[in-house]
Structure formats: C-alpha cells, structure tokens
Image (cartoon, rainbow, N blue to C red):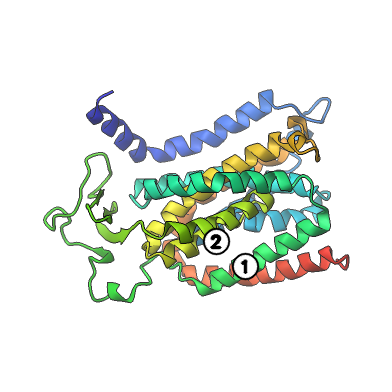
C-alpha cells in the first residue's frame, strides 16, 4: 500500500472515528452474548439484565475520569468494593479489578481515538512508555492473584492517597498550559497561530484540520493540533518517566490504576505540554489496561493462585459497563469545555482521600 493511500485511509478513519468507536462495544456485547462461557447453566434474560443499573453509574464515572485524564479503575474499583455489595453481593479482589480494567480499557480507547483525531498524541513517546511498562504491569497483575485481601486493600488505599496528592498538586486544566511563558508567547506552548501554514508550522495531509508534527535535528518537537494550536517540547527525561511508569505500571496491574496519575506528573515534569501529556497518557493507560485485563482473565493459573476461568468473568456486568465507558469517553471532551476541570479534579481528589481512609480501616479489620 502506497504512503498516499495509507494517509487517505488514516484521515478517513479519524474523520468517522465515532462510528468505529461505537461499533466496537456493540460487537463486544454481541460476541459475549453468543460465545462467552458463563457460570449460569441456562443464562436467560434475567441473567443478562441483572446489572443494567451499572450503565448510568459507569457512564458518569467514565465521563469524570476522562475529563480529568486519570485511570477509570480509580473510581470503578472503589465503587465495586463499597457500593456494589449494597445492591448485589461482594466481589473477590481479582474479579472487581478485572471488571474495572475491562471497562477502563474500552473507555480509554474511546477517548484515546478522540485525542489522536485532534493531533494531541505523541506516538513515539507513548510506545516507548508502554514498552517499558509491560513487565511491571504483568508483574502487578500476577501479584493480585496471590496477595491477601487485607494487603490488597492497604495497597489500594496507598495508591488512592498518592493519586489524591498528585491531583491536588498538578494543573490538569484542559484549557491551557501551566507554563507561565505561554501568556507571553501564544505560539510557544499551546497558543493559537493565526495561520499555521503561513507561520511555517507542520501541516500533514493525513491529519484533520491544520494538524501536523515534525522533529528537528536537535530533538525539538513541533506539534500542531486540529484547531491550529501549536506546541513545542522535547522527548528528553526518559529516565525520570521510566521510574514513575514502573511504579505506576505495577499498581496498574495490581489495582487497575496508578500509571495514569504518575504518568501525568512525570510528563509535565519533563516539560511536555499539558494537552499533549494528557492525550499521550490516554494511549499508555488504555494499552496497559488492555494488557492487565488479559493477564487478569488468563493468568491465574500461572502463579498458582486463584485460577479464574473465562466462565467466572461476570459477563452480565461488563455488557453494561463497556458501552457505558465508551460513551463516557466520547462525552468527556464536551464536559471539559462546559465545566471547570480544576473543580472536578479537586472533587475526585477529596473522594480518593475518603475512600482510602475506608480502605485502611478495612485492611486493619475495622471496616
């Protein structure tokens, strides 16, 4: 296939990404309904519709986390620990993490495509981060099968406390960069160029709008998004990011979140513009969530822990949570324009603090 044909296909896919994004969960639900093994001997309507009420819950959760740019399981897993048993029954740690990861993988994939469409994903940086995170994600996921439940709750509480602190500390405002110099030079870090082409900025044929990216010989990256806003940065700081993503990757596999929160901090700390950091981080979290989901579904027997068969997966839950998170991922960009991301971020951080306290009490046998 020629380069021009590939570019046309890529541009066509991005233009109609909503169709493909919403086709994926429909295909998933159909495949689960007709082929997935279940623990029920004769699954009928009562089985498949038992958890219909999870749809609005996960829709709201996915919208919140994608607006802020963090891992979906950071809300989904605590919900399944504390709220879900009030209306249904308690879930084993490895099961609730699995549900959270499968749902998160679809939701973040949906949101990731939207960020790619707007030209806000550094693919080279994302692939490097995912590659370095793989052994830590796999290790954390396998660890979840063998650690005691009190220790699981304690580690989950630590991860939530760290996420709350990082959310309070970090400026994740989608409307602009936290670089003070941006006010003085609108074209330096997310400013809008009146005419990107006239300014000599990249404008790739395979991207929608005046979007493009080029890397200079000295490693400086110039990126233009679909709206014509341009960003300048370098990909330096790999060691610093590697340290954060290794710790975050372990928690991503263990608890279903962590790599997103630590990843944002490391990218902003190495001067990656906030919009590019959030967009790139969505790809990293989505791919590691998919990887962790596969390990949680198939990996129990490898470590001699709780061996979970496909039939033990609560498919009647994920047939509602997956479409909900995909929809939330598409709604999030509109919510971020209508509401203050800073307000949502602080609300989520305070919620994390409350949840982590409850988890520590459970770990100590007091909850």
x 24%, y 56%: residue: 218
Q: Is residue 71 visible?
A: no
209 sits to left or right of 160:
left
Figure quadrant of the N terminus: top left
Question: Measured from the top left, where is residue 361 in percent x and y?
Answer: 82, 68
Mark 2 neighbour class, 10 Å CA radius: few under 14, some 14 to 19, many 20 or more:
many
Camera-side residue of 328 and 126: 126
Q: Earlier in the sequence, mark 2 or mark 1?
A: 1
**Relative to 187, does residue 121 appear above or below in the rendering?**
above
Question: Measured from the top left, where is residue 203 in percent x and y?
Answer: 20, 48
CB-based contact (under 8 Å), mark 2 and mark 1: yes
Residue that extends furthest to the right in the rendered view of this protein: 365
Say which quarter of the image contains residue 220. Answer: bottom left
Q: From mark 2 to mark 1, how far is it between C-alphas?
A: 9 Å
**Relative to 289, does residue 180 appear above or below in the rendering?**
below
Camera-side residue of 140 and 213: 140
Q: Which residue is mark 2?
A: 261
Residue that extends furthest to the front in the rendered view of this protein: 239
x 37%, y 61%: residue: 272
x 66%, y 54%: residue: 76
Camera-side residue of 341 and 138: 138
176 sits to left or right of 155:
left
Question: Measured from the top left, where is residue 184 in percent x and y?
Answer: 24, 76
**Relative to 38, does residue 186 appear above or below in the rendering?**
below
Question: Measured from the top left, where is residue 69 in percent x and y?
Answer: 50, 59
117 sits to left or right of 363:
left
Figure quadrant of the C terminus: bottom right
Q: Which residue is mark 1?
A: 162
Helix, strand or loop for disc 2: helix
Camera-side residue of 76 and 164: 164
Which numbered marker is on residue 21? none
Q: Is residue 155 visible?
A: yes
């Amino acid at each position: 296939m020629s380069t021009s044909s590939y570019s046309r296909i890529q541009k066509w896919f991005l233009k109609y990404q909503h169709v493909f994004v919403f086709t994926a969960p429909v295909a998933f639900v159909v495949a689960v309904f007709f082929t997935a093994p279940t623990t029920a001997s004769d699954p009928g309507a009562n089985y498949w519709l038992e958890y219909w009420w999870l749809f609005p819950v996960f829709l709201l959760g996915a919208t919140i986390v994608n607006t802020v740019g963090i891992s979906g399981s950071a809300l989904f897993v605590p919900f399944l620990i504390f709220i879900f048993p009030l209306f249904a029954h308690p879930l084993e740690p490895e099961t609730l993490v699995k549900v959270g990861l499968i749902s998160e993988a679809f939701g973040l994939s949906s949101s990731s495509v939207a960020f790619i469409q707007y030209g806000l994903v550094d693919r080279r940086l994302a692939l490097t981060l995912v590659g370095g995170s793989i052994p830590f994600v796999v290790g954390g996921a396998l660890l979840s099968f063998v650690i005691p439940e009190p220790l699981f709750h304690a580690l989950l509480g630590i991860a939530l406390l760290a996420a709350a602190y990082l959310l309070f500390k970090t400026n994740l405002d989608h409307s602009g960069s936290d670089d003070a110099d941006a006010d003085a030079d609108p074209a330096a870090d997310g400013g809008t160029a009146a005419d990107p082409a006239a300014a000599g900025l990249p404008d790739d044929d395979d991207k929608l709008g005046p979007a493009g990216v080029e890397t200079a010989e000295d490693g400086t990256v110039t990126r233009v998004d679909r709206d014509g806003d341009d960003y300048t940065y370098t990909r330096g700081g790999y060691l610093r990011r590697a340290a954060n993503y290794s710790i975050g990757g372990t928690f991503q596999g263990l608890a279903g979140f962590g790599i997103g929160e630590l990843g944002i901090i490391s990218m902003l700390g190495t001067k990656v513009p906030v919009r590019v950091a959030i967009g790139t981080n969505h790809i990293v979290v989505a791919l590691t969530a998919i990887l962790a989901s596969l390990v949680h579904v198939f990996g129990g027997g490898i470590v001699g822990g709780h061996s979970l068969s496909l039939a033990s997966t609560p498919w009647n839950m994920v047939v509602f949570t997956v479409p909900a998170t995909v929809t939330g991922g598409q709604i999030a960009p509109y919510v971020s324009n209508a509401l203050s991301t800073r307000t949502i971020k602080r609300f989520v951080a305070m919620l994390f603090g409350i949840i982590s306290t409850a988890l520590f009490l459970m770990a100590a046998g007091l909850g």
